[in-house]
Image (cartoon, coloured by chain):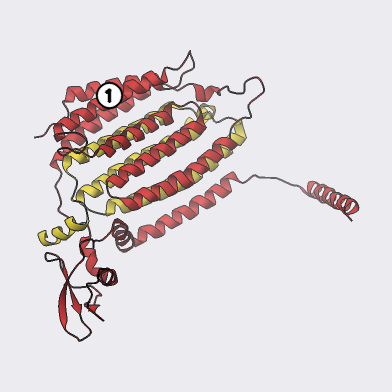
Chain colours: A yellow, B red
Amino acid sequence: MNTVWTLAQAGYPAALPEATLAHYLFVSAAMFVIGLIGFLTRRNLIIMFLCTELMFQAAGIALVSFSRFHMNMTGQSFVIFIVTVAAAEAAMALALVVLLFRKRESLDAEEWTELKG
Amino acid sequence: MLQYIHPLALYAACGIGAIGVCIALPRREGKNPQILGAVIASLAGAVVLISMGLAAGGFFGAGLSPSIYYYVFAFLALGASLRVITHPRPVYAALYFVLSILATAGLFLLLSAEFMAFALVIVYAGAILITYLFVIMLATQAPTEEMENALTEYDASAREPVVATAAGFVLLAVLSTLLFRGVQDLPHLKNNAGQSLLAEMPRKIESGLRASGKLPEGGKVITNEKGEATIDFAARSVQVKTAGGETVSVQLPADMAVSNVEMVGFNLLRDHPGSIEIAGVILLMAMLGAVVLSRKQVQLDEDAKERHAKSLAAEFAQGAETNP
């Protein structure tokens, strides 16, 4: 294992120290919480979906920094799938928003309180 | 055991941050003190980062702390995210989201995830955000004459700002407490980061050797039956067969390494081929769903169809008369 490690260090930066990992994870957590607060407080449907994208971003930062910490590329492959799902979600959500806007002429989430069941 | 931040300091910072975000959220009454809120929130963030830097033994690359670019990009990413949720105008919120994506791409570059950084800029800032901007512009009531710059009621005021920020920052306090404690117990796997993949790319080695002039005339990198080159990783040398048929050991160039794109590509296509197929199906389904959902349903009965055809024919005849 050690012998392979020499080549890795020559061509690729060494693994992240724990303290640096903690810095990146803090940014990820803070971004996630900002997205969560936005999702809870904003009443515009489009901004609410924008905030879910922020939360996806935060998850992506955590995955990439763990991938770098463990020097394992699966984390980065996973972010590709997150981006795919985010794109699919954006397409569907925006189509829904357009549909809802046609019905009520408003983007207010509180117009749809009858959906709460 | 290293303590990144004193628990009380962390909780205090979360409380101050919650107050800042709560002040910055849009509300109806009076003028919004958004700058004041942003300053208070960034003060709270600075407390946490400074405390972490002290624990890591320095700032801006000293000790174990990340480089100065980390601080720049983290500040940009968090500030832009805060602006996304506090800006009352949706178009500006979407543009601040682009800024936050760009800063995140910067953080990815610092983590040497080049492929993800550029994919993020292309897919998010290039594609998804354009869709958002289009929908924001489509789904907005046309402003009337007298209130051209007025905000709609639902954009101008937040719903339950105090409860939501309190809940969010309690979550942040719990998350960061667990993160800072849990990070230290992580096993540090000395993975070789896929550098052994170099053996599977004999053609890359060959062209690298040729470019640096180290490949003997007519030489070929020796591969086994799986197509892998024979590399001595400790000595950084590879077995090469010369034109004369003898086997020599050639030193690899200093810059010969597996790049991030190659590692991600190998990982993606060799370890998760099924997931890619499923991702393709998800995208196809999303496309179909979006088309079905946003289709404008026009119901035409037989009479309406006939009237429409007649009016089209009349228009056509009129057009033929005026432009012979």
Taking A36 as reference, is B304 left or right?
A: right
Q: Position of residue A70 (x, y in %)?
A: 20, 50
Could you tell me residue A25's position as x and y percent?
Answer: 25, 38
Question: Visible in this render: residue B166?
Answer: no
Q: Quadrant of residue B146?
A: top right
Nearer to us in this view, B300 or B291: B291
Q: Quadrant of the N terminus of chain B?
A: top left
Residue topped by disc 1: B44
Is A57 in front, or is A109?
A57
| Outermost residue to the bottom | B244
Q: What residue lies at 14% left-to-right and 32% top-to-bottom?
A: B55
Query: Is residue B235 visible in this depiction of the protein?
Result: yes
Quadrant location of the C terminus of chain B in the rendered image: bottom right
**Residue sitting at 18 percent across and 34 percent down?**
B180
Q: Residue B25: image x %, image y %? A: 42, 22
Q: Amino acid at mark 1?
A: Ala
Front residue of this view, candidates B68 and B96? B68
Q: What chain letter is assigned to the residue under label 1?
A: B
Along the viewing direction, whichever of B194 and A48 lies nearer the viewer: B194
Q: Find the residue positioned furthest to the front.
A: B213
Above or below, comparing residue B89 to residue A5 in the picture: above
